[in-house]
Amino acid sequence: MRQIVRQGCPLSDRGALQIQRLDSSQPDQVARWEAFVARCPNATFFHRAGWQTIIRDVFRHPTHFLFAEQDGEILGVLPLAHVNSRLFGNALTGLPFAVYGGVASESAAAALALESEAQRLAIELDTDHLELRHIERRHTDWPVQELYVTFRKAILPKEEDNMLAIPRKQRAMVRKGIKNGLTSQVDANADRFFALYADNVHRHGTPAFPKRYFQALMQTFGRDCEVLTVSSAEGRPLSSVLSFYFRDEVLPYYAGDDEAARDLAANDFKYWELMRLACARGLKVFDYGRSKEGTGPYAFKRNWGFEPTPLNYEYRLYKRESIPQNNPANAKYKLLIATWRRMPLGLANWLGPFIVRNLG
């Protein structure tokens, strides 16, 4: 394990602040990292140590999970991964495949030391840019990606109050799903989810993550990663969502549905069931996740009564003059999306992982 000592960043009269790297083969170190993330107010599910093995083993990207330590106490963490692609650029990102990331710290000095080391590392790796996916703005002098928002809302203590908090038209869709006899079930594996997810993203013209990614998520995070699948009255799977659980929050993160789901209101019923079950568990926050402004998912979440909060993805540009736009909203991908929709599903599922691993 490489250790970098940062002089000039003491906290009171304590020892020097040290920046070290997480070694996932050391259970004690992983446990200390996880304990810090669990207690740090600005940490998220995407700061958890398990992402290191997933990004490294599933996507084959080098990882640099940094932590600031002083006198044996972790004061901050910054998980990073290096994604180097001929198609999409060379970046050091905190964190690829995550909606949140960047520094989680209990100390301003620790946060500064972590970001300084990230910048040094990005230059050493000869990257085009460093990207830190913060929720709140940290650097007014860094370029920021003004594209994504997140939707978060409190889960009320009583089930009926949560139902009534849904705006009338959307609530009617939930009740339609109930009247259609839809049922939900927590799945033990990702099989039904993946079939619905892969078909859904193919219809939208975007590549799918490999099935083994979702299997790895469920295996790595255990009870904190759960699949909920909605079926018709006849038992046909219609809609499914893979969610993360972190402290008192539920985060529906990946989803997929059958073409018949809309007419039967299966998507609305799915998210209601997830909210209802979260309420029964005593959870406090429903995190509807990231969306791009002006898109269908953005409008869908607004219709549920959720208000958007801008996400601040901050950049340090080294070999670029502008922030990269590697997303479906970029007009240069219009032809690729149209071509992908026409591709046979089997071929798309085989080819997709080779592309999506580099998007981050």
Image (cartoon, rainbow, N blue to C red):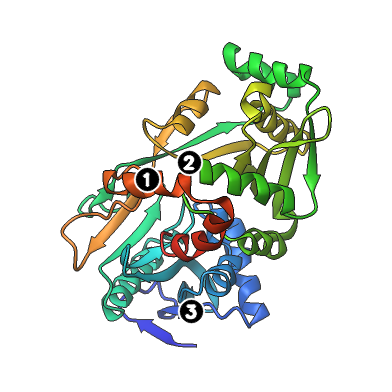
Judge from the rendering whether residue 341 lies leftward or rightward of residue 145; answer left or right. Answer: right
| Disc number placed over residue 165 in the picture, else none | none
Give the distance between the C-alpha atoms of the residues marked 2 and 1, in whole angstroms. Answer: 10 Å
Q: Is residue 252 visible?
A: no
Which residue is under mark 1?
Answer: 328
Q: Are marks 2 and 1 in contact (CB under 8 Å)?
A: yes
Q: Residues within 10 Å of mark 1 (few under 14, many from 20)?
A: some
**Considering only order in the chain, which callout, 1 or 2, is on the residue closer to the N terminus?**
2
For marks 2 and 3 on the same chain, the one whose residue lies earlier in the sequence: 3
Q: Position of residue 196 (x, y in %)?
A: 65, 44
User: SS of the residue at dot 2?
Assistant: loop
Res. 144 in view: yes
Residues at discs 2 and 3 in contact (Cβ within 8 Å): no
Amino acid, disc 1 = Pro
* Residue pictured at 32% horizontal, 81% vertical: 7
> Which residue is outermost to the left?
321
Query: What x and y, as percent, mark residue 153?
Result: 56, 31
> What is the distance, in whole Å, between disc 2 and disc 3 at their CAs?
39 Å
Picture residue at 36% right of the left edge, 58% below the top: 132
Residue 108 vertical position relative to residue 236 in the rendered view, above or below: below
Q: Is residue 142 left or right of residue 42?
A: left
- C-alpha gap between disc 1 and disc 3: 34 Å
Judging by the rendered image, the residue that carries numbered circle 3 is 21
Disc 3 packing (10 Å; few <14; some 14–19; many ≥20):
some
**Identity of the amino acid at label 2?**
His
Question: Is 332 situated left or right of 78 in this image?
Answer: left
Which residue is located at x 29 percent, y 71 percent? 119
Q: Looking at the rendering, in which quadrant would you find the C terminus? A: bottom left
Name the residue beneath numbered marker 2.
Answer: 204
